[in-house]
Amino acid sequence: MNEEINAQDIRLSETDLTDFHVEMGKPLPDGAAVASRDSVIAAVKEVQDPELMLSIYDLGLVYRIDISEKGDVCVDMTLTSPTCPIAGEMPGMVAASVAKLEGVGRIKVQLVWDPPWTLDKVSEDLKIALGI
């Protein structure tokens, strides 16, 4: 498991009210095993939209997850609305969840707004559960 995360390990960039990204973590040592895509997705699924109390992954808010050969993870995500009051906190929540995994080096989570989120991005299982 990664060592304990300290505030100084997290770098948050806020260039305007709708541009947020978080970078954290340290490079893995050479030859270290890299976390699987499934484990990274499972970690992201643990993060819930605080108003809907549903997984941000199942809501279709995660647009991209890339894992490098060295264990660095990049995530592009969005929110249901650019005016979300916790917009600046969500990338950090995702990064912290992924950072708990073995085999993860540097993590970058970027909040993006293009394409805009719509209900059609919700997973099929969640659409059935919600009756949409």
Image: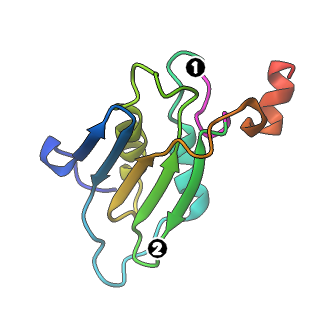
Element at label 2: loop
Q: Which residue is mark 1?
A: 53
Q: Of the numbered discs in the image, which one, if any, rests on residue 74?
A: none
Real-space Cα separation, disc 2 to disc 1, in angstroms: 30 Å
Residue 57 falls within the magenta-colored stretch: yes
Q: Give the total number of marks visible in the rendering.
A: 2
Judge the density around disc 1: few (<14), some (14-19), many (≥20) Cα neighbours within 10 Å: few
> Do the residues under discs 2 and 1 have CB atoms within 8 angstroms?
no
Q: Amino acid at mark 1?
A: Met
* Residue lying farthest to the front in this orientation: 16
Residue 118: image location, x then y, percent: 70, 32
Residues 117 and 52: in front is: 117
Residue displayed at 53% across by 41% down: 113
User: At x 34% / y 39%, what residue is drawn?
Assistant: 92
Q: Residue at x 40, y 77 (%)?
A: 70
Amino acid bearing label 2: Ser
Which labelled disc corresponds to residue 68? 2
Q: Residue furthest toward the bottom?
A: 31
Q: Position of residue 43 (x, y in %)?
A: 51, 46
Query: The residue tagged with tag 1: helix, strand or loop?
Result: loop
Quadrant of the snapshot with the C terminus? top right
Magenta stretch mostly in which secondary structure?
loop
Rendered image quadrant of residue 101:
bottom left
Which quadrant holds residue 6? top left
First to last magenta residue range: 54-59
Decide which of 17, 28 is in the foreground and name it. Answer: 17
Q: Is 88 one of the magenta-colored residues?
A: no
